[in-house]
Image: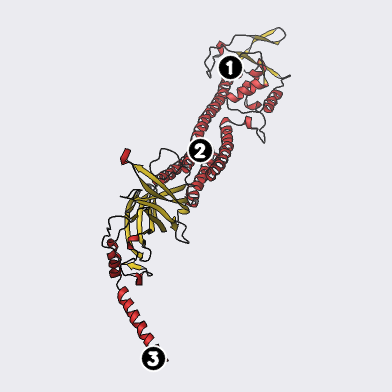
Amino acid sequence: MLAMACLMAAVLASVASSAETATCSSTSKRLEDLIPEEYDRALPPKSPSEVATVGIKLYVTSIASIDQKNQHISVDGYFRVSWKDARLAAGGNGQEACSSETLDLPESDWSKIWQPDVYFDNSLAEAYGSGMLTLSPRTGSVYKSQRMHHKFTCKMHFAKLPFDIQTCPIVASSYSKNTADLHVTPMNGGVEVHEGYDGTTEFEILRVKELLETRYYGDGENRVGYDFVTLELSIKRRPDAHMKSIFLTCILFALVSWSGTFIKRDAPPARVAISVIPVLIMLNLTNSVNASLPPLNYETWLTSFLFAITLFCLSTVFEYGIVAFLLAREAAGDSRFKAVKATVAHERKQAKAAGENQNMVFQEIPKETPIFKTVPMNQCPPAQVSAGAGTKVPQVKFCIPTEVQRIFNPADSATISAKQLRQAFRRLNKRFSLKQVEEIMTDMGVEGSDMTREELLLLLSDLDHHMPTEVLSTSFCDRPLSEQVDLVFRVGFVTLLAFLTFYWMMSGMA
């Protein structure tokens, strides 16, 4: 009897299972049974007390590309949408037996039910791949997830390049339904990045967030609002590549340009080459950075630094221009010094040839005599000295041209000081120290701190004989002007470069 009862129960269970399987076996048939006769797939689900709500979410698997020049960002991932359509919930249509199951609808059946017309407002190109759409007959809840590849506009600001952070908005909304018919909201945070993915080799994903706003269009009675969901994807540039290939390169070539100031001043080809080449390198780096950016009406952190370093490199070109000018002046001073000695030697030679070199008397010549001209002996006023008791002989005349005297005694003073004599030598590119000038005066037997006109003429008669001893070390002020410019420029250049680099780094990382 017990065995018969068990057999009977098994048969009934098998019949019930077979009936349920036959009823629920076809997803398309079940969907058709769920859809009421009055169902209109063109209308959103709506109840008298509540407006339908659509939740959207963007699941980002990767950033395919970032086009800085055109300001585009391409994203790969999944676009997910969920909503509730009570019209599809199992009710009095005889489907209670299957109401606890979820229907995975084939793509051919997607068009049989209402779906929100959500679009991306800033999308430039889009492509959708395979996906899924599930329906819960018990509640009428619908969930759709589909593979996508979208290109979005992303307005970028490069002022802090390469420490810039770009925020790319992805704006979604319903195309045809306003807030009176449909609400669009972010679902479970709105945007999510695949676990373990942190961005591209150039940019890292910093943060994601969602914003919800209602935008109104039209005027008066025609004014309607639309829900817009903004999914913000913030990306931060990885600065290492720019810092190594551009920033550090700038500093190194600026130092190359600076090292040119240690090359001999009288080697123009080497000085000019090592000054100009870094300038060309800077221009090339600037062009390479600008080529990857859109046309900008402002300077970026990096291009500003490039411009500053370009000015630094250019400054070495201009500095050598000043040095070359001073070298020309110094060469002219050397030539004048040689001319002074040659003029005096010529006068002495003429006096010797005339046999009048026994007793030398130094007299000035008329001031209108041209510089560096041999003065005829007959232009010197005659004079006589006693050669012995009761004997008179003609005085031998040895003339120093007036223009030569004017170099050393411009004011035609009866005496000149050591400082005045020092300045006179500097006009002839002889950078004697005050101590060396005093050595000259001591060698001349000058008593006191001033030299008389007659002692000056004696000095001019034989400059080489009275030149001071060379010194082992020379003070800054006693060096040639061209060398002084080089020394000041070396210190100023590297100091300002260090300050500029430190300031730029602090401002970029702030």
- Where residue 311 appears, x then y in whole percent? 48, 37
Q: Nearer the viewer, mark 2 or mark 1?
A: 2
- Mark 2 and mark 1: span between their CA atoms? 43 Å
Question: Which residue is labeled 3 in the image?
Answer: 4
Q: Are marks 3 and 1 in contact (CB under 8 Å)?
A: no
Q: Is residue 151 visible?
A: yes
Q: Crowding at label 3, few (<14), some or many (≥20) Cα neighbours within 10 Å?
A: few
Measure how far apart labels 3 and 2 are at the Cα level: 106 Å
Residue at image coords 44%, 45%: 285
Up-down relation of residue 466 to residue 248 (above or below):
above
In the image, 201 versus 13, the foreground residue is 13
- Upstream in sequence: badge 3 or badge 1: 3
Depicted 129 relative to depicted 174: above or below: below
In the rendered image, the vertical position of residue 65 relative to residue 366, given as above or below:
below
Provide residue 218's location: percent of width, then percent of height: 32, 40
Secondary structure under the numbered disc 1 in the rendered image: helix
Q: Quadrant of residue 449?
A: top right
